[in-house]
Amino acid sequence: MSDAVRILTRGPKPPGWEGLEIALTARAGAIFLSDVPEAEADLVLAHGLRAVPALPGNRLIVHLLPSDLEVDPPPDLTGVERFLCSDKALLELLIRRLDLPASRITLLPAVSGESFRSPIRAEQTDMGLISASPAALAAALDLLVALYKDMPDAGIRLRLLDPLPETARDRMLWRRINSAPGLRYAIDVAPEATGLDAWLSETGFLLIPPDFSHDAETLRPAALAAGTLPMPDVHASGWPPLLRPALKEMRARLIAMLSRSQGRIKLLAQARNQRRIDHAVDKTLADWHAILHPAGPAAVATAVRRVLVVWGIADWEGFHRREMLIALADNLPADSRLLFIDPHSHYATLLKRDPAAGGRLRDEALLHPRSPHPGVLAMRLLTGGLPPEIPTSPLLKRGLSRGDLAEAVAREFFGPEVVITHWLYKPDQFQILSENADAIYEVYDDYTLDFSSGAPLPEVERQEALALAAARHVFFTSDVLAQRKGAQARSHSTVTNGVALSAFAAARGALPETAASGARPLVGYLGNLSDFFDWELMAELCEGRPQTDFLLCGNIEWGRLGARSVLAEKMMSLPNVVFTGAVARPEGAAAMACCDALIIPFRVNLAMDAVNPLKLWEYFSLGLPVVSSPMQTINLPSPLLRIAREVTEWQTALTDALASDDPVSASRRRAMAAERDWHILTRRYLRDAGFDVSVRREASGRG
């Protein structure tokens, strides 16, 4: 094999590593060596920090292990090409401890072949806790007490697998257990000899506290195989896409909600499916191949002729149009790349907000990009608050405006002759560009109107008039927006919002085919909860339907609610309402697929009348019935889409949606969503923006 990489392994091999070596040798161009001089190898792979050579002489990759948490002091890691880890929770701990650079870290799950053939039991609702930590036990007892308020007859039991140490605090906990009504008989301490699989088989929910210390790579598949749904604390990471409310008081309510609906069964199906995807052998081997055979940056740079600089209004990882940009990058011509600029630029402020971000910020001060997707580079332009002792890219010292700095970075990466086009989302972003910059403006909301009232905003109107005139081409996501603003643009077209079809189709495809009898209906909402959300309507609707559960997945923008924050607090007190906080697309897709009907309760005004809601097509991709406030842009007939304005109309429409949706409508919704797959729509975007899409870059390629 001419491109084989000779790999010298150092340190004890983790369990299961031999099988992966065989697969990598056969399919990823690897030859594994041991007990040979380092000079005979192309690459050294150190299993754990203790195996890192003192003076590495060639490529060095470090495979991070749980034992690395105990290595003190750590070795010199400046010469490490890449850090690999198969456990996200462990990786986050080590990033904080070792201040690892984000640009050299890869989360790479081990090869797994779980089939998860065991059925999911609908009736299992016991909670399980694997911990001897008094703090974890105290938190679990708080959860149990709160849960009994919602489910007094559910027979919930807290199972402790580990023996508890005899400390004064533990004795106090047991006194609390014995004195609380109902708790005494709700606690079942499993004998030490009880096997893990047997214990899990009697547990419906597995609590994952922040100080969780057991091997997640072992426990994850065991829990999912046993039909046990992990319920991670918001601070416990490394688990499949599952809901974890940011507010602790919502955890008990979510467990109750998932138990009395089909939610637990459906979320388990989602978690099992995601485990299969994440640990697919072909994907894992492809990821390893990319690490062993990295693409040379010079080869990438010489091929690029055009760069699309996208100015985000949120960081890449949390940007709600990220899936659209991924599809845009996949459809770019072969000679083009997408450079995404994170919005915040003040070093000191970012470090204060997240003290653990020092390593990542130092990378960004050197203008080291990250590559979150083939054809995409994402980075931050730190133009303020940089301490003098931090090494900084010379480009940041030139005093350039942010727009000129982005163009200088693009030419530094891809060559001085690249053609640069800017893609912007809000009117005030145009202030960062030079007068002659080539710009595209995408308008998906009417920012000139107040979202809550629909009242005009004169200053934004002034800014947008300048933006519309400055942009070479303007995209509107609805005909209403185009009718209002198109005359002010030099060139414009309308392209509807779309859907990341693969994520939602995967969620729908993983669901069990049969429904549990007697389950309570579950209604879902996905998206931000801000001033455009109809809090008056929803507070009355949720309170008036105590036998219907409402799962609201999205960030509450308290700063924009004003007097309506009282209504949000009222909804948070209702036992049939759960707010999960912000979720990523995979978690959101899984959560919405667990529901029986989905809702778009927007305020009715001129601002919202122009919206083509992205969430509508996400909902439709699941085929589920949808009830929405009226909007001129989505005038579809019932039962395809049920429209309601007042609370009484919402009550009727929701009852009808939960009781009588038909397969024909579900199929039609999925077909409409499929027509709006981002990978289809972004070809139109690029064509109208002047890109030649006749020869596209391979989506699976690198660079």
Image: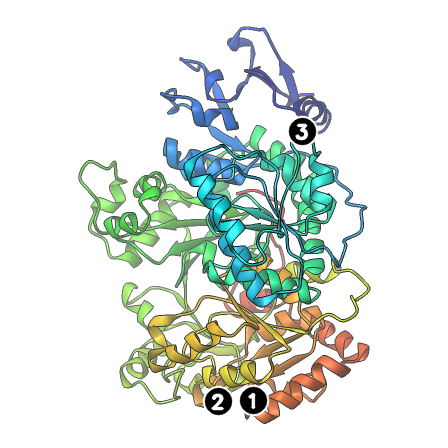
321 with respect to 256 (left or right):
left
Picture quadrant of residue 355 = top left
Q: Which residue is labeled 2 in the image?
A: 604
Which amino acid type is marked by label 3? Ala
- Residue 66 in percent (x, y) is at 51, 28
Q: Residue furthest left?
A: 388
Left or right of residue 600, residue 532 in this image: left
User: Element type at marker 1?
Assistant: loop
Neighbours of disc 3 within 10 Å: few (<14), some (14-19), many (20+): many
Decide: few, some or many residues near mark 1? Use Cα within 10 Å; few <14, some 14-19, many ≥20.
Answer: many
Residue drawn at 51 percent across, 82 percent down:
538
Vertical relation: 239 (above or below) 497? above
Q: Which residue is mark 1?
A: 630
Q: Residue at x 45, y 66 (%)?
A: 555
When the figure is inspected, residue 638 is found, relative to residue 3, above or below; the finding is below
Pick whichever of labels 1 and 2 is earlier in the sequence. Answer: 2
Residue 138 location (% of width, % of height): 47, 48
- Which residue is pictured at 36% across the width and 83% down the height? 448
Q: Are marks 1 and 2 in contact (CB under 8 Å)?
A: yes
| Residue 633 x, y percent position in the rendering | 56, 85
Nearer to me, 653 or 258: 258
The residue beneath circle 3 is 28
Q: Which-is-in-front pick, marks 3 and 1? A: 1
x, y percent for residue 204: 68, 52
Q: Eyeballing the image, is 54 above or below 340?
A: above
Q: Is residue 371 visible?
A: no
Near-viewer residue (106 or 180): 180
Front label number (3 vs 2):
2
Label 3 to label 1: alpha-carbon separation: 54 Å
- Does residue 660 appear to the left or right of 24 in the view shown? right
The amino acid at mark 2 is Val
SS assignment at label 2:
loop
